[in-house]
Amino acid sequence: MTLNTKLCFCFMTNLTMTMATCKRLFLILLIQCILLAGSCDNQHYIFDVINFGAIGDGANDDTEAFEHAWDAVCGSSVSSPTFLVPGGKTFVLQPLTFNGQCNSTTFTFQAIISLLPYQFYRVLHLLVRMAASIINGTIIAPSNPSEWKCNDKNCHEWITFEHFDGLSIQGSGTINGQGTNWWTLSCEDNEEVCDKKATGFVIAHSNNVQISELTFEDSPKVHISLERSTLINATRLTIQAPGDSPNTDGIHIQHSTNVSIDQCLIQTGDDCVSIGDGSSYIDISNINCGPGHGISIGSLGRNGNNESVEFVHVRDVSFNRSTNGVRIKTWQGGHGHVRNITFERITSHGARRPIIIDQYYCPHDHCSNETSAVEIDNVAYSQIEGTTDKETAVQLACSESTPCTNIFMKDINLRYEEDEEKTSSYCLNAQGLRNGRVSPNVTCLQQDDNF
Ligand SMILES: *[C@@H]1O[C@H](CO)[C@@H](O)[C@H](O)[C@H]1NC(C)=O
Ligand SMILES: *[C@@H]1O[C@H](CO)[C@@H](O)[C@H](O)[C@H]1NC(C)=O
Ligand SMILES: *[C@@H]1O[C@H](CO)[C@@H](O)[C@H](O)[C@H]1NC(C)=O
Ligand SMILES: *[C@@H]1O[C@H](CO)[C@@H](O)[C@H](O)[C@H]1NC(C)=O
Ligand SMILES: *[C@@H]1O[C@H](CO)[C@@H](O)[C@H](O)[C@H]1NC(C)=O
Ligand SMILES: *[C@@H]1O[C@H](CO)[C@@H](O)[C@H](O)[C@H]1NC(C)=O
Ligand SMILES: *[C@@H]1O[C@H](CO)[C@@H](O)[C@H](O)[C@H]1NC(C)=O
Ligand SMILES: *[C@@H]1O[C@H](CO)[C@@H](O)[C@H](O)[C@H]1NC(C)=O
Ligand SMILES: *[C@@H]1O[C@H](CO)[C@@H](O)[C@H](O)[C@H]1NC(C)=O
């Protein structure tokens, strides 16, 4: 879409005018708009799902009402339409996709602004469309797996936002996947049903997304998945599911760059945050994690895959009784790399394995020994302290063919909570340096007080 087409959406609001006419008037209008900057900022319309037929009594299926409200958002020409799920009500939703690529116009902001000289900034900021979604109410999924209505054979995703460039999702609401009945299904008995298990909330193929304040609960599978997206900020989220619920990762990141996750409380039955293939420039800070499986890079390299993750910074994280703290896990036989990773200011309150690299990841016990491995290079750990639930506080299990290189440790103080004297470390095929106090001693690293 051309720039003037976009601009015309502003001017065409409340006017009957064809696109062609509008384009002819483009220049004049633009000049006017500059002179009157501000007056183009037409109504910040709110599209309340209640006005589109949603009931919100926790029983009625409100999916269609949500679809109609979203169509209205898409069809509107206002610059900042807001999709509202009002507070004090509970809405039942079947799997639903919010597509930012509306027929008339895509929600977009950053791209144009950066192409234009500064003086246009203010005007354009008012003109381009930015979608917002306020979720103050509770959204629940059908509680019985057999009540899920899926488009194709499997559900895979419950609530999806895709193809946005400029989206904010926030509110005091709760998104509850009612996963209990999914968790008890045995995958061995029924692979088909198991395969339908949905990720709760997905942001895909999008840029410039802000997601904040919301609470996510009891997803059938992963709670939030960020896929093939860039520039995502997730802040002040609460994510909760029982510690024994299977595969209920808090936030999973895949094929995404420039993602920041800050100030979140994550208590689930799997990784608090997991960082999968194709992720880079990931910044994770101020997280309370546990119960859960810790913050994990991987798993990578399954079935000989070539998978990589780089430039991950994890800082100011507290682990409370999680099974791992900061973890890197790769399968034998893979390709690719994990590079330039920093873990700092981490506190462990009785986590089982606060520091772990596992290049032999094999959750099912029947993996063959392979000669290739996902390479692990440049991993720095600093200011990591607290108590652990097992003697082995530090575990570096690296591959023989592809040893871990440039592992740096500085100011580590971990203590086995039952008996501090018994705290130990395990090291296999890892190379690197340690500086200052590193307790337990990690003997495969060389002392070097200059980094
Ligand atoms: C886009 O157009 C198609 C075909 O005309 C229609 O089926 C669909 O509902 C429209 N989508 C939106 C979001 O307006
Ligand atoms: C959503 O909830 C917040 C906090 O409860 C409140 O401040 C805000 O006004 C609500 N927004 C709408 C549109 O109802
Ligand atoms: C997103 O997070 C980054 C890093 O924390 C921060 O610099 C940036 O300002 C944030 N963007 C928004 C829109 O909040
Ligand atoms: C992502 O962050 C890196 C490092 O800060 C920066 O060089 C790059 O331009 C960013 N990418 C985007 C799409 O903003
Ligand atoms: C893995 O992928 C990277 C980037 O796509 C490529 O450069 C590299 O050669 C691949 N490695 C293997 C072993 O296929
Ligand atoms: C750890 O979790 C337990 C149980 O939820 C809680 O009582 C305790 O205060 C937490 N500890 C820290 C340090 O957050
Ligand atoms: C990766 O990390 C290492 C060690 O911290 C550093 O020397 C190197 O410059 C980093 N690479 C890039 C591309 O930043
Ligand atoms: C793989 O190698 C380990 C260590 O050398 C050995 O203990 C184990 O039996 C081997 N496993 C298989 C399946 O060959
Ligand atoms: C750590 O282990 C190395 C290698 O065994 C040893 O030289 C060093 O003195 C130990 N450091 C401490 C503080 O015990």
Image (cartoon, helix red, strand yellow):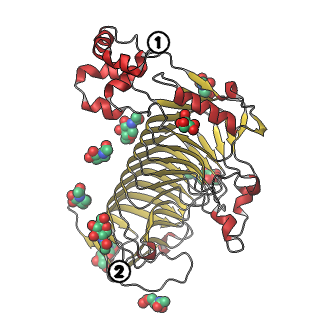
Residue, disc 2: 372
Residue positioned 29% across, 23% down in the render:
121
Task: From the top left corner, tell me how far across and down residue 288 is, in percent.
Answer: 52, 50
Q: How crowded is mark 2: few (under 14 residues within 10 Å), some or many (20 or more)?
A: some
Front residue of this view, candidates 71 and 389: 71
| Distance Cα–Cα, label 2 vs label 1 | 65 Å
Task: From the top left corner, tell me how far across and down residue 362 is, in percent.
Answer: 51, 77
Question: In the rendered image, is residue 28 in sight?
Answer: yes
Q: In this view, does 449 lie to the left or right of 63?
A: left
What is the three-letter code of the residue carrying label 1? Leu
Quadrant of the frame with the N terminus = top left
Task: From the top left corner, tell me how far across and down residue 301 is, in percent.
Answer: 41, 71
Front residue of this view, candidates 208 and 394: 208
Residue, disc 1: 15
Front residue of this view, candidates 282 and 277: 277
What is the total number of numbered labels drawn onto the structure image? 2
Front residue of this view, candidates 41 and 420: 41
What is the three-letter code of the residue carrying label 2? Ser
Element type where label 2 sits in the image: loop
**6 above or below 351?**
above
Earlier along the polypeptide chain: callout 2 or callout 1? 1
Task: From the top left corner, tell me how far across and down residue 44 is, in percent.
Answer: 51, 19
Give the number of the disc on residue 50: none
**206 above or below 306?**
above
Q: How crowded is mark 1: few (under 14 residues within 10 Å), some or many (20 or more)?
A: few
Element type where label 1 sits in the image: loop
Observer-side mark, 2 or 1, equals 1
Quadrant of the frame with the C terminus = bottom left
Does the numbered disc 1 mark a residue whose Cβ is under 8 Å from ligand 1?
no
Does the numbered disc 2 mark a residue whose Cβ is under 8 Å from ligand 5?
yes
